[in-house]
Amino acid sequence: MSKKRYETGSRNVFKDLGVPHAEEHLVKAQLVFKIDGLMKERGLKQIDAADLFGVTQPDVSKMLRGEFRQFSVERLLRFLVALNQDVEIVVKPHRDRNNPAALQVC
């Protein structure tokens, strides 16, 4: 039997794939995941979300399918606020000497 070879990835698949600006892309993906979850939880249709966000329904559709490069992190945060979510940005000293400082969505 041959052993399967694999490589353990980082916490950022975009970095592993060599996507430019991988950290920002991961944060955007996490924010869109939250937006999608809230929309589903509320039974909010794309057309209604588009109206709430001030964008078109096709833009919402693209965003939910992973095409969110056109949206800044700030704009995605504003979408969360439009969905009646409080958004906190916390800056604190990095204390893990084994890993670099990073952006994180909780």
Image (tube, rainbow, N blue to C red):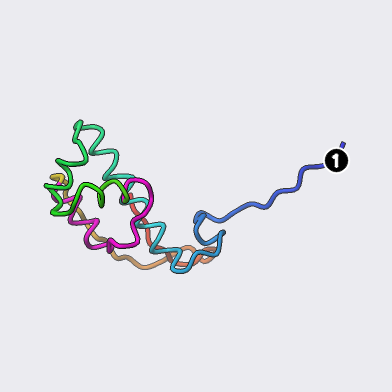
Side of 105 relative to 57 (left or right): right
| Residue at 12% across, 47% down | 51
Where on the picture, by quarter, is residue 83?
A: top left
**Picture coordinates of residue 2, whole percent (x, y):** 85, 40
Quadrant occupied by the N terminus:
top right
**Picture coordinates of residue 17, whole percent (x, y):** 56, 59
| Residue at 19% across, 35% down | 44
Q: Residues within 10 Å of mark 1 (few under 14, many from 20)?
A: few
**Picture coordinates of residue 23, whole percent (x, y):** 43, 63
Q: Which residue is mark 1?
A: 2
Q: Vertical placement of 19 versus 34: above or below?
A: below
Q: Is residue 18 magenta?
A: no
- Mark 1: secondary structure: loop
Q: Vertical placement of 42 versus 94: above or below?
A: above
Q: Is residue 79 magenta?
A: yes
Q: Could you tell me the amino acid type at mark 1?
A: Ser
Where on the picture, by quarter, is residue 18?
A: bottom right
Highlighted range, magenta = 63-82
Where on the picture, by quarter, is residue 48?
A: top left
Task: Give whichever of 91, 66 is nearer the camera.
Answer: 66
**Picture coordinates of residue 40, whole percent (x, y):** 26, 34
| Residue at 52% across, 66% down | 97
Side of 41 relative to 1 (left or right): left
